[in-house]
Amino acid sequence: MKREIYLKEIIEELSILKSKIELSSKVNLLDINLISEYHIQEILNVVFDLKLINSNLQNKNAKAIDLQDEINCLAVQVTSNYRKIKVQDTLNKFFEETLENKFSTLLIFILGKKQLKYQNLVIKEGFNFNPDEHIFDFSKLISKLKTLPINKIEKIRNILKRDRIHVQSRIGTKSIFKSKQIIRKKIITNLINVQDVNIATISYYDPSYKFIYEDLIIRSIVDKSYPNFDDEKTGERGDWYKVFSHDLNEHYLEVETFYNVEIVYDNKGIWNYLNERNKENLPKDLNIGNFRVLQRIALEDIVEIDMNYEDPMIFVQFKNHQAYFEEIPFIRGYFNNTKDCRTVAYFELKNQNINL
């Protein structure tokens, strides 16, 4: 049972890593790739009982390879570029540095998914390099993991989970800022109408007015159940759901859920959920309302926006099976004319009093 749980967690962690690498590589944020070298170094050491170290410690080799094990005569190139031209470039540099005299095996590890075939590679005569055997990607790694003893699988799972806790601080605030801006630009380009001259006025009162699409699908990057509600293998609810578009902030996307909540609140905006309390026993100075709910999804947790579905698909890095970091009741705004309008009223968490 533990084996299945650990393997599932490893697959989820690799999926998250793969998505971050792809997004970062598109804008040349290569620091996430450097971090991933250490993931692969530790993982390969466990899988194959190697003693890989980072080749930057040996400057003369850093140009051609990323990791090396001089005891087992094995070198590794780690890259997010899966194309044949990158593989050939690695081989060329490897032979130019005459590293075949020092390392009998060269592995190329693709951070993501490799090509199906790498044909007609130019390989120095006498050196054994088989693309099917010596080019790895995440899928091939997972296949290899399935045959390992449980103690090694647990080690790899712990490596990935440990590193993800710290990866955000290690890649730096500049990279986080850039990735957020990329996603924000994608949302504006694909989901928001900037042509309508009435948008500025109306969306001040009702932010959802500026969205081209009313319905959105929020989906985990590791979800495999869509379009079914339940996962066929586990029987559990799939990690995807439909929402209404609402607003875009500098730091998060707001979406409206399909359900309501009852809350109590005073004239200063202090509030709490009604829960199971009897309405008749509440103080008379409190108001009771049944309101819609907003979810706020951090831009740094949004991995991709796919427009190739009936409704736009927002792929998100779920945390504890949740896409959002904050969920609050709200009163929707509207604009009919300058005399008949109302701005959105948010019941922010900072104003929630659990004793109310």
Image (tube, rainbow, N blue to C red):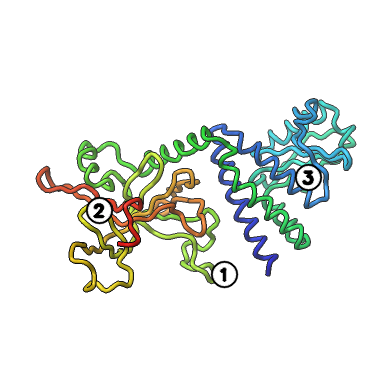
Instruction: Identify the image quadrant of the C terminus.
Output: bottom left
Instruction: Decide: is 275 above or below 156.
Output: below
Specify few, some or many for label 3: CA neighbours under 10 Å numbering under 14, 14-19, or 20 or more.
some
- Which residue lies under the disc numbered 1? 234
Residue at 29% of width from left, 53% of height from top? 347
Q: Position of residue 60 (x, y in %)?
A: 80, 25
Residue at 69% of width from left, 40% of height from top? 37
Task: Pick whichever of labels 2 and 3 is earlier in the sequence.
Answer: 3
Secondary structure found at label 3? helix
Asked if the residues shown at circle 2 and circle 3 are in contact, with their CB atoms under 8 angstroms apart, the answer is no
The label nearer to you, 3 versus 1, is 1
The disc labelled 2 sits on which kind of residue? Gly
Specify few, some or many for label 2: CA neighbours under 10 Å numbering under 14, 14-19, or 20 or more.
some
The disc labelled 3 sits on which kind of residue? His
Residue at 63% of width from left, 61% of height from top? 8
Would you say residue 81 is visible in this rendering? no
- The span from disc 3 to disc 1 (Cα, nearest Å) is 34 Å
Residue 273, quarter of picture:
bottom left
- The span from disc 2 to disc 3 (Cα, nearest Å) is 63 Å
- Which residue lies under the disc numbered 3? 134
Q: Position of residue 331 (x, y in %)?
A: 24, 55
In the displayed structure, does residue 204 sit left or right of residue 85?
Answer: left
